[in-house]
Image (spheres, helix red, strand yellow):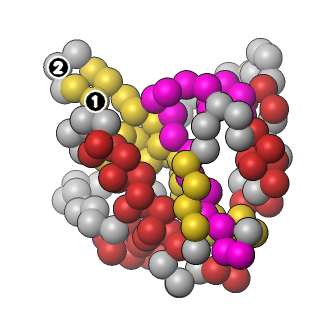
Amino acid sequence: MEIVVLGPDDADKVSAAAELFDNEPSLHATSRFLTDPNHHLLIAYDEGVPVGFVSGVEVTHPDKGTEMFLYELAVAPDHRRRGVGRNLVERLAGIASNRGCYGMWVLTDAANTAALATYERAGANPEGDPQVMLSWQFRPTNE
């Protein structure tokens, strides 16, 4: 397995891995994501075929510093339980550490045992209190 850290000129690699994403990646959003130095997208390949990805976003706050938000992790169904997800998460954690982030965090459903196991194997510690996620939905303007 090879893990590639994507850069601004790698939109074609995102398109080639489109089946791993929830929706078809848009060229505009892909370009915007990849050109921001605080956004990170890594793709795992098995013999040249994309089999997983992880994305992270550095978040900075005046009184806390910078941390990495693990935005999304996906692994192709036929490559699950082979360490792909753990390796992607560990690689993103290494990037976060090297860039001076004080930590990394992710949200997942309590019932998502596969995700919980992956994150814990990659070194995450579950927080004790249950969290509530609230969201706002806006109509896209340029995508």
> Badge 2: few (under 14), some or many (20 or more) residues near its Cα, within 10 Å?
few
Left or right: 19 as drawn, with respect to 98: right
Left or right: 12 as drawn, with respect to 123: right
Residue 19 location, quadrant: bottom right
For badge 2, the amino acid type reads Asp
> Badge 1: few (under 14), some or many (20 or more) residues near its Cα, within 10 Å?
some
In the rendered image, residue 127, in percent from the top left (x then y), is placed at: 22, 57
How far apart are labels 1 and 2 at the CA level? 10 Å
The one of 92 and 10 positioned closer to us in this rendering: 10
Q: Is residue 132 visible?
A: no
Q: Which residues are magenta?
A: 30-47
Q: Are marks 1 and 2 in contact (CB under 8 Å)?
A: no
Magenta segment: does it hold 35? yes
Residue where numbered disc 1 is placed: 66
Q: Which residue is painted at 73% across and 69% down in the image? A: 48
Label 2 SS: loop
Label 1 SS: strand
For badge 1, the amino acid type reads Thr
Residue where numbered disc 2 is placed: 63
Magenta segment: does it hold 115? no
Quadrant into which the C terminus falls: top right
Left or right: 62 as drawn, with respect to 43: left
Quadrant into which the N terminus falls: bottom right
Q: Which residue is painted at 33% across and 74% down in the image? A: 121
Residue 33 location, quadrant: top right
Q: Which residue is painted at 47% across and 43% down in the image? A: 56
In the rendered image, residue 109, in percent from the top left (x then y), is placed at: 46, 61
Mark 1 vs mark 2: give the one in front.
Answer: 1
Residue 106 sits above or below residue 80 on the image: above
In the rendered image, residue 73, in percent from the top left (x then y), is placed at: 54, 58
Q: Which residue is painted at 78% across and 26% down in the image? A: 28
